[in-house]
Image (spheres, grey):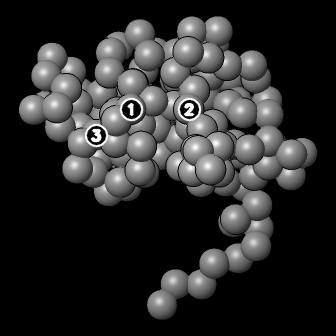
C-alpha cells in the first residue's frame, strides 16, 4: 500500500474534475460535442503544464441536467487562503474548454479571476442546490 505524505498533499495543483458518468460525455445526450477530444485536450494541457494543472475523471458529479459538468478545484495553496471549488455546467464546446484551461493555467480559483464567460456556466454544488430547494 502506498504511503502519502502531508507534503505531497500540500502541493496539489489546480485540478479539473471531469464528469464522465451517465450523462456527461454521452454523445446521445449531447450530440455534436467531441467528448473524447475534450478530455484529450484537457489531459494534454495538464501534461504540458509542468505540474500546475491536473485532470481526473469521475463517474457522476450529480447535476445531470447540466451535463457536461466539471469542477475546478483550487491548488492546495489557494485552498489554504480560503479558495473553494467552482462547479461548472454545460461545458460542451471548445470555447468553454478554452476558458477553463486559460483559468487553470493562470492558477484557478483563489489565484485568478475566471473568464467572464464562465460566470454563465457556474452552478451550485449539488448539496447547495438541495439546500436552496427546501
Q: Is residue 41 placed above or below 25 in the rendered structure?
A: above
Q: Are marks 3 and 2 in contact (CB under 8 Å)?
A: no
Q: Earlier in the sequence, mark 1 or mark 3?
A: 3
Percent x, y of residue 120: 56, 15
Q: Earlier in the sequence, mark 1 or mark 2?
A: 1
Q: Quadrant of residue 41?
A: top left
Label 3 SS: loop
Residue sticking out furthest to the bottom: 1
Label 2 SS: strand
Percent x, y of residue 63: 42, 43
Residue at left offset 65%, top offset 43%: 132
Residue sticking out furthest to the right: 81
Percent x, y of residue 76: 75, 52
Residue at left offset 34%, top offset 35%: 65
Q: Callout 1: few (<14), some (14-19), or many (20+) C-alpha neighbours within 10 Å? A: some
Front of the two marks 3 and 2:
2
Q: Which residue is mark 1?
A: 66
Q: Which residue is mark 3?
A: 24
Q: Is residue 75 placed above or below 119 in the rendered structure?
A: below
Residue at left offset 74%, top offset 44%: 84
Q: Are marks 1 and 2 in contact (CB under 8 Å)?
A: yes
Q: Is residue 121 left or right of residue 67?
A: right
Q: Is residue 71 left or right of residue 113?
A: left
Label 1 SS: helix
Cα gap from disc 1 to disc 3, whole angstroms: 9 Å
Q: Which residue is mark 2?
A: 123
Q: Nearer the viewer, residue 33 or 78?
A: 33
Residue at left offset 13%, top offset 22%: 31
Amino acid at each position: 500500500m502506498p504511503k502519502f505524505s502531508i507534503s505531497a498533499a500540500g502541493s496539489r495543483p489546480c485540478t479539473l474534475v471531469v464528469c464522465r458518468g451517465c450523462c456527461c460525455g454521452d454523445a446521445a445526450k449531447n450530440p455534436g460535442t467531441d467528448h473524447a477530444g475534450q478530455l484529450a485536450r484537457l489531459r494534454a494541457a495538464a501534461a504540458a503544464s509542468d505540474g500546475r494543472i491536473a485532470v481526473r475523471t469521475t463517474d457522476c458529479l450529480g447535476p445531470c441536467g447540466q451535463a457536461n459538468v466539471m469542477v475546478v478545484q483550487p491548488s492546495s495553496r489557494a485552498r489554504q487562503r480560503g479558495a473553494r471549488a467552482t462547479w461548472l455546467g454545460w461545458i460542451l464546446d471548445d470555447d468553454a474548454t478554452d476558458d477553463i484551461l486559460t483559468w487553470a493555467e493562470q492558477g484557478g480559483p483563489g489565484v485568478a479571476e475566471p473568464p467572464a464567460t464562465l460566470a454563465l456556466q457556474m452552478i451550485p454544488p449539488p448539496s447547495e442546490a438541495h439546500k436552496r430547494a427546501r
